[in-house]
Image: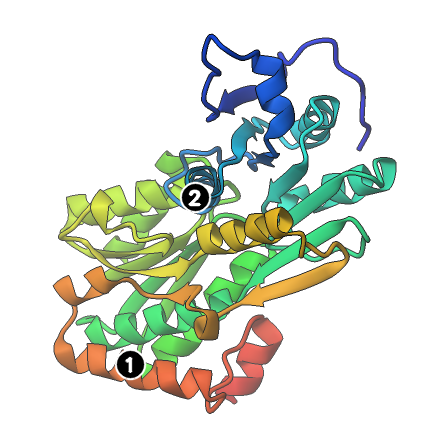
Amino acid sequence: MTFKKLATLAMATVVSASLLVGCSGSKESAKDDKITVAMITDVAGVNDQSFNQSAWEGLQRAEKELGIEVKYLESKQDSDYATNIETLVDEDVDLILGVGMKLADAIKEGAELYPDQNFVLVDEEIDASNVKNILFKAEESAYLAGLIAGKTTKTNNVGFIGGMELPVIDTFKYGYMAGVKAANPDAKVQSQYANSFTDQAKGKAIANQMYSNGADIVFTCGGDVGTGAIEAAKENGKYAIGVDRDQSDLAPKNVLTSAIKRVDAGVFETVKSYINGTFEGGTTTTYGLEENAVGVPDTTKNLVSQEILDLVEETITKLKNKEITVPKNEEEYNAMVK
Protein backbone atom coordinates (compact mmCIF):
# COMPACT_ATOMS: atom_id res chain seq x y z
CA MET A 1 0.00 0.00 0.00
CA THR A 2 1.58 3.29 -1.05
CA PHE A 3 0.98 6.75 0.37
CA LYS A 4 1.04 9.57 -2.16
CA LYS A 5 0.76 13.30 -1.61
CA LEU A 6 -2.39 14.75 -3.09
CA ALA A 7 -2.92 18.20 -4.54
CA THR A 8 -6.67 18.00 -4.03
CA LEU A 9 -9.23 16.12 -1.97
CA ALA A 10 -10.92 14.64 -5.01
CA MET A 11 -10.37 11.05 -3.87
CA ALA A 12 -12.30 11.49 -0.64
CA THR A 13 -15.72 12.58 0.43
CA VAL A 14 -15.21 14.97 3.32
CA VAL A 15 -17.93 15.91 5.71
CA SER A 16 -17.19 18.42 8.45
CA ALA A 17 -19.45 18.67 11.45
CA SER A 18 -17.75 21.80 12.83
CA LEU A 19 -19.49 25.10 13.35
CA LEU A 20 -18.45 28.15 11.34
CA VAL A 21 -16.92 31.00 13.25
CA GLY A 22 -18.81 34.27 13.68
CA CYS A 23 -17.85 37.57 12.09
CA SER A 24 -15.74 38.67 15.05
CA GLY A 25 -13.13 35.92 14.65
CA SER A 26 -11.31 34.19 11.86
CA LYS A 27 -12.04 30.62 10.81
CA GLU A 28 -8.35 29.78 11.02
CA SER A 29 -7.89 30.97 14.59
CA ALA A 30 -10.96 29.05 15.78
CA LYS A 31 -9.67 25.87 14.15
CA ASP A 32 -6.35 26.30 15.97
CA ASP A 33 -8.18 26.35 19.30
CA LYS A 34 -10.13 23.15 18.64
CA ILE A 35 -8.99 19.57 18.67
CA THR A 36 -9.93 17.87 15.42
CA VAL A 37 -10.79 14.18 15.27
CA ALA A 38 -11.57 12.42 12.00
CA MET A 39 -12.60 8.91 11.08
CA ILE A 40 -12.06 6.92 7.91
CA THR A 41 -14.83 4.50 6.99
CA ASP A 42 -14.36 1.18 5.29
CA VAL A 43 -16.03 0.63 1.93
CA ALA A 44 -19.48 0.22 3.49
CA GLY A 45 -19.64 3.98 4.06
CA VAL A 46 -20.89 6.12 6.91
CA ASN A 47 -24.59 5.42 6.26
CA ASP A 48 -24.29 1.62 6.44
CA GLN A 49 -26.95 1.48 9.20
CA SER A 50 -24.37 -0.47 11.14
CA PHE A 51 -20.69 -0.37 12.13
CA ASN A 52 -19.49 2.83 10.44
CA GLN A 53 -22.65 4.70 11.34
CA SER A 54 -22.24 3.73 14.99
CA ALA A 55 -18.66 5.04 15.00
CA TRP A 56 -19.81 8.33 13.47
CA GLU A 57 -22.53 8.63 16.11
CA GLY A 58 -19.79 8.30 18.74
CA LEU A 59 -17.86 11.15 17.15
CA GLN A 60 -20.98 13.30 16.88
CA ARG A 61 -21.56 12.76 20.59
CA ALA A 62 -17.95 13.77 21.26
CA GLU A 63 -18.45 16.94 19.24
CA LYS A 64 -21.53 17.85 21.26
CA GLU A 65 -20.24 16.95 24.71
CA LEU A 66 -16.51 17.61 24.42
CA GLY A 67 -16.50 20.64 22.11
CA ILE A 68 -14.23 19.23 19.43
CA GLU A 69 -14.34 19.37 15.65
CA VAL A 70 -15.18 16.09 13.90
CA LYS A 71 -15.31 14.89 10.32
CA TYR A 72 -15.16 11.72 8.28
CA LEU A 73 -13.73 10.51 5.00
CA GLU A 74 -15.52 7.73 3.14
CA SER A 75 -13.56 5.02 1.37
CA LYS A 76 -15.12 3.88 -1.88
CA GLN A 77 -12.51 1.17 -2.42
CA ASP A 78 -9.68 -0.39 -0.43
CA SER A 79 -7.06 1.71 -2.19
CA ASP A 80 -8.65 4.84 -0.67
CA TYR A 81 -7.52 3.97 2.87
CA ALA A 82 -3.94 5.15 2.43
CA THR A 83 -5.07 8.17 0.41
CA ASN A 84 -7.49 9.21 3.12
CA ILE A 85 -4.85 8.91 5.84
CA GLU A 86 -2.54 11.10 3.77
CA THR A 87 -5.30 13.68 3.37
CA LEU A 88 -5.99 13.89 7.10
CA VAL A 89 -2.30 14.10 8.00
CA ASP A 90 -1.97 16.98 5.54
CA GLU A 91 -4.89 18.69 7.27
CA ASP A 92 -3.14 18.42 10.67
CA VAL A 93 -5.96 16.39 12.20
CA ASP A 94 -5.11 15.61 15.82
CA LEU A 95 -6.53 12.08 16.02
CA ILE A 96 -7.32 9.73 13.11
CA LEU A 97 -9.68 6.78 13.55
CA GLY A 98 -9.69 3.82 11.18
CA VAL A 99 -13.02 2.02 11.37
CA GLY A 100 -12.79 -1.70 10.74
CA MET A 101 -10.12 -4.34 10.39
CA LYS A 102 -9.81 -3.73 6.65
CA LEU A 103 -7.97 -0.51 7.50
CA ALA A 104 -5.37 -2.28 9.65
CA ASP A 105 -2.59 -2.40 7.05
CA ALA A 106 -3.09 1.23 6.06
CA ILE A 107 -3.13 2.40 9.69
CA LYS A 108 0.00 0.38 10.43
CA GLU A 109 1.85 1.89 7.49
CA GLY A 110 0.58 5.37 8.30
CA ALA A 111 1.71 5.01 11.92
CA GLU A 112 5.21 4.11 10.74
CA LEU A 113 5.39 7.00 8.26
CA TYR A 114 3.98 9.55 10.72
CA PRO A 115 5.26 8.64 14.22
CA ASP A 116 4.01 11.94 15.69
CA GLN A 117 0.44 11.33 14.48
CA ASN A 118 -1.98 9.61 16.84
CA PHE A 119 -4.27 6.91 15.45
CA VAL A 120 -7.12 4.72 16.66
CA LEU A 121 -7.94 1.36 15.05
CA VAL A 122 -11.38 -0.13 15.64
CA ASP A 123 -11.91 -3.91 15.53
CA GLU A 124 -8.32 -4.98 14.97
CA GLU A 125 -5.07 -4.93 16.90
CA ILE A 126 -1.68 -3.80 15.63
CA ASP A 127 1.54 -3.14 17.48
CA ALA A 128 2.45 0.53 17.12
CA SER A 129 3.31 3.05 19.82
CA ASN A 130 1.06 5.74 18.30
CA VAL A 131 -2.00 3.53 17.71
CA LYS A 132 -4.75 2.85 20.25
CA ASN A 133 -6.68 -0.36 19.46
CA ILE A 134 -10.36 -0.83 20.31
CA LEU A 135 -11.81 -4.34 20.36
CA PHE A 136 -15.24 -5.71 21.27
CA LYS A 137 -16.45 -9.03 22.61
CA ALA A 138 -18.93 -9.32 19.77
CA GLU A 139 -19.25 -13.04 20.41
CA GLU A 140 -21.16 -12.20 23.61
CA SER A 141 -23.89 -10.19 21.91
CA ALA A 142 -24.03 -12.75 19.08
CA TYR A 143 -24.45 -15.53 21.63
CA LEU A 144 -27.43 -13.73 23.16
CA ALA A 145 -28.94 -13.21 19.70
CA GLY A 146 -28.41 -16.92 19.03
CA LEU A 147 -30.21 -17.84 22.25
CA ILE A 148 -33.17 -15.74 21.19
CA ALA A 149 -33.19 -17.24 17.70
CA GLY A 150 -32.89 -20.80 19.01
CA LYS A 151 -35.80 -20.34 21.41
CA THR A 152 -37.97 -18.42 18.93
CA THR A 153 -37.63 -20.48 15.74
CA LYS A 154 -40.68 -22.55 14.81
CA THR A 155 -38.89 -24.49 12.08
CA ASN A 156 -35.67 -25.37 13.93
CA ASN A 157 -33.92 -23.68 11.03
CA VAL A 158 -32.13 -20.31 11.20
CA GLY A 159 -29.55 -18.53 9.09
CA PHE A 160 -26.34 -16.51 9.29
CA ILE A 161 -25.05 -14.23 6.52
CA GLY A 162 -21.56 -12.80 6.80
CA GLY A 163 -20.28 -9.88 4.75
CA MET A 164 -16.84 -11.37 4.19
CA GLU A 165 -14.97 -14.29 5.67
CA LEU A 166 -12.89 -12.31 8.17
CA PRO A 167 -12.00 -13.04 11.82
CA VAL A 168 -14.23 -10.24 13.12
CA ILE A 169 -17.22 -11.63 11.19
CA ASP A 170 -16.45 -15.16 12.37
CA THR A 171 -16.62 -13.85 15.93
CA PHE A 172 -20.29 -13.04 15.33
CA LYS A 173 -20.92 -16.24 13.39
CA TYR A 174 -19.61 -18.72 15.93
CA GLY A 175 -20.96 -16.81 18.91
CA TYR A 176 -24.38 -16.89 17.26
CA MET A 177 -24.16 -20.57 16.37
CA ALA A 178 -23.15 -21.39 19.95
CA GLY A 179 -26.14 -19.49 21.30
CA VAL A 180 -28.52 -21.24 18.92
CA LYS A 181 -27.19 -24.66 19.89
CA ALA A 182 -27.32 -23.87 23.62
CA ALA A 183 -30.97 -22.88 23.32
CA ASN A 184 -32.05 -25.50 20.80
CA PRO A 185 -29.70 -28.43 20.05
CA ASP A 186 -32.00 -29.58 17.24
CA ALA A 187 -31.80 -26.30 15.32
CA LYS A 188 -29.97 -26.12 12.00
CA VAL A 189 -27.91 -23.04 11.12
CA GLN A 190 -27.55 -22.19 7.43
CA SER A 191 -24.45 -20.09 6.76
CA GLN A 192 -23.19 -18.13 3.76
CA TYR A 193 -20.89 -15.18 2.99
CA ALA A 194 -21.85 -12.40 0.61
CA ASN A 195 -18.24 -11.36 -0.16
CA SER A 196 -19.37 -7.76 0.22
CA PHE A 197 -20.28 -5.19 2.84
CA THR A 198 -22.25 -3.01 0.43
CA ASP A 199 -24.33 -5.26 -1.83
CA GLN A 200 -27.90 -5.00 -0.52
CA ALA A 201 -29.24 -7.04 -3.44
CA LYS A 202 -26.87 -9.90 -2.60
CA GLY A 203 -27.95 -9.85 1.04
CA LYS A 204 -31.59 -9.91 0.03
CA ALA A 205 -31.03 -12.79 -2.40
CA ILE A 206 -29.16 -14.92 0.14
CA ALA A 207 -31.78 -14.29 2.81
CA ASN A 208 -34.58 -15.14 0.38
CA GLN A 209 -32.85 -18.43 -0.38
CA MET A 210 -32.46 -19.24 3.31
CA TYR A 211 -36.12 -18.50 3.96
CA SER A 212 -37.03 -20.73 1.00
CA ASN A 213 -34.89 -23.46 2.58
CA GLY A 214 -36.86 -23.36 5.81
CA ALA A 215 -35.22 -20.67 7.92
CA ASP A 216 -37.56 -18.37 9.78
CA ILE A 217 -34.84 -16.17 11.32
CA VAL A 218 -31.71 -14.81 9.60
CA PHE A 219 -28.89 -12.94 11.31
CA THR A 220 -26.69 -10.84 9.03
CA CYS A 221 -23.34 -9.32 9.91
CA GLY A 222 -22.27 -7.40 6.83
CA GLY A 223 -23.04 -3.67 6.74
CA ASP A 224 -25.47 -2.82 3.96
CA VAL A 225 -25.74 -6.51 3.04
CA GLY A 226 -27.81 -6.76 6.21
CA THR A 227 -30.13 -3.99 5.02
CA GLY A 228 -31.03 -6.19 2.07
CA ALA A 229 -31.56 -9.21 4.32
CA ILE A 230 -33.91 -7.23 6.53
CA GLU A 231 -35.89 -6.21 3.45
CA ALA A 232 -36.20 -9.91 2.56
CA ALA A 233 -37.53 -10.63 6.05
CA LYS A 234 -40.22 -7.97 5.59
CA GLU A 235 -41.28 -9.37 2.22
CA ASN A 236 -41.37 -12.96 3.48
CA GLY A 237 -43.06 -12.23 6.79
CA LYS A 238 -40.06 -13.71 8.63
CA TYR A 239 -37.62 -12.50 11.25
CA ALA A 240 -34.21 -10.86 10.84
CA ILE A 241 -31.58 -10.08 13.45
CA GLY A 242 -29.73 -6.77 13.22
CA VAL A 243 -26.10 -6.07 14.03
CA ASP A 244 -23.85 -3.44 15.65
CA ARG A 245 -26.69 -1.04 16.47
CA ASP A 246 -30.41 -1.44 17.19
CA GLN A 247 -31.79 -1.97 13.68
CA SER A 248 -35.42 -2.42 14.70
CA ASP A 249 -36.18 0.95 13.13
CA LEU A 250 -35.63 -0.64 9.71
CA ALA A 251 -38.45 -3.14 10.22
CA PRO A 252 -40.13 -2.96 13.65
CA LYS A 253 -42.29 -6.05 13.00
CA ASN A 254 -39.48 -8.17 11.61
CA VAL A 255 -36.23 -7.34 13.42
CA LEU A 256 -36.42 -9.79 16.30
CA THR A 257 -33.39 -8.33 18.09
CA SER A 258 -29.95 -6.95 17.26
CA ALA A 259 -26.48 -8.10 18.31
CA ILE A 260 -25.25 -4.74 19.51
CA LYS A 261 -21.62 -3.69 19.45
CA ARG A 262 -21.36 -0.21 20.94
CA VAL A 263 -18.72 1.13 18.60
CA ASP A 264 -20.10 4.58 19.40
CA ALA A 265 -19.30 4.14 23.10
CA GLY A 266 -15.80 2.85 22.42
CA VAL A 267 -15.08 5.73 20.06
CA PHE A 268 -16.47 8.33 22.48
CA GLU A 269 -14.47 7.01 25.45
CA THR A 270 -11.28 6.90 23.40
CA VAL A 271 -11.71 10.47 22.17
CA LYS A 272 -12.51 11.54 25.73
CA SER A 273 -9.24 10.00 26.92
CA TYR A 274 -7.40 11.97 24.25
CA ILE A 275 -9.02 15.21 25.42
CA ASN A 276 -8.24 14.39 29.06
CA GLY A 277 -4.61 13.56 28.33
CA THR A 278 -4.90 9.87 29.26
CA PHE A 279 -4.75 8.51 25.71
CA GLU A 280 -2.17 5.73 25.43
CA GLY A 281 -0.89 4.59 22.09
CA GLY A 282 0.44 1.06 21.88
CA THR A 283 -2.41 -0.26 24.03
CA THR A 284 -5.66 -2.15 23.46
CA THR A 285 -9.01 -1.74 25.22
CA THR A 286 -11.58 -4.50 24.88
CA TYR A 287 -15.24 -3.73 25.53
CA GLY A 288 -17.81 -6.38 26.45
CA LEU A 289 -20.89 -7.01 28.56
CA GLU A 290 -19.13 -5.82 31.71
CA GLU A 291 -18.67 -2.42 30.10
CA ASN A 292 -22.24 -2.42 28.72
CA ALA A 293 -20.70 -2.18 25.26
CA VAL A 294 -22.28 -5.30 23.75
CA GLY A 295 -25.66 -6.97 24.20
CA VAL A 296 -29.18 -6.79 22.82
CA PRO A 297 -31.41 -3.67 22.79
CA ASP A 298 -34.45 -2.88 24.91
CA THR A 299 -36.62 -3.13 21.80
CA THR A 300 -36.10 -6.90 21.94
CA LYS A 301 -39.04 -7.01 24.34
CA ASN A 302 -41.37 -5.93 21.53
CA LEU A 303 -41.21 -9.29 19.73
CA VAL A 304 -39.67 -11.70 22.25
CA SER A 305 -41.52 -13.47 25.06
CA GLN A 306 -40.86 -12.72 28.72
CA GLU A 307 -39.66 -16.28 29.24
CA ILE A 308 -36.92 -15.83 26.65
CA LEU A 309 -36.06 -12.37 28.00
CA ASP A 310 -35.59 -13.90 31.45
CA LEU A 311 -33.26 -16.51 29.95
CA VAL A 312 -31.25 -13.74 28.31
CA GLU A 313 -30.87 -11.91 31.63
CA GLU A 314 -29.76 -15.12 33.37
CA THR A 315 -27.25 -15.74 30.60
CA ILE A 316 -25.86 -12.21 30.80
CA THR A 317 -25.14 -12.80 34.49
CA LYS A 318 -23.41 -16.09 33.72
CA LEU A 319 -21.34 -14.49 30.97
CA LYS A 320 -20.25 -11.68 33.27
CA ASN A 321 -19.34 -14.25 35.93
CA LYS A 322 -17.41 -16.23 33.31
CA GLU A 323 -19.59 -19.30 33.86
CA ILE A 324 -20.03 -19.49 30.08
CA THR A 325 -17.19 -19.18 27.57
CA VAL A 326 -18.34 -18.17 24.09
CA PRO A 327 -16.36 -19.36 21.05
CA LYS A 328 -14.86 -16.73 18.73
CA ASN A 329 -13.79 -18.97 15.86
CA GLU A 330 -14.41 -22.34 14.24
CA GLU A 331 -11.80 -24.17 16.32
CA GLU A 332 -13.29 -22.99 19.60
CA TYR A 333 -16.82 -23.73 18.39
CA ASN A 334 -15.96 -27.27 17.33
CA ALA A 335 -14.30 -27.90 20.69
CA MET A 336 -17.43 -26.65 22.47
CA VAL A 337 -19.94 -28.80 20.58
CA LYS A 338 -17.99 -32.05 20.82
The residue labelled by disc 2 is 65
Residue 313 - label = 1
Mark 2 vs 1, N-terminal side = 2
Viewer-nearest residue: 257 or 184? 257
Position in image of residue 190 (x %, y %)? 38, 63
Could you tell me if residue 184 is visible in this image?
no
Q: Residue at x 77, y 38 (%)?
A: 117
Nearer to us: label 2 or label 1: 2
Residue 176 - label = none
Name the image quarter holding the N terminus: top right
Number of residues whose C-alpha sits closer than 10 Å to that of mark 2, classed few (under 14), some (14–19) or many (20 or more):
few
Judged from the image, the secondary structure of the residue bearing numbered disc 2 is helix
Q: CA distance from mark 2 to mark 1?
A: 32 Å
| Mark 2 and mark 1 residues within 8 Å of each other at the beta carbon | no
View extreme (front): residue: 24
Say which amino acid is labelled 1: Glu
Q: Residue at x 53, y 57 (%)?
A: 169
Position in image of residue 105 (x %, y %)? 75, 43
Q: Residue at x 32, y 65 (%)?
A: 296
Viewer-nearest residue: 7 or 149? 7
Position in image of residue 35 (x %, y %)? 61, 34
Judged from the image, the secondary structure of the residue bearing numbered disc 1 is helix
Q: Looking at the picture, does residue 201 appear above or below residue 139? A: above
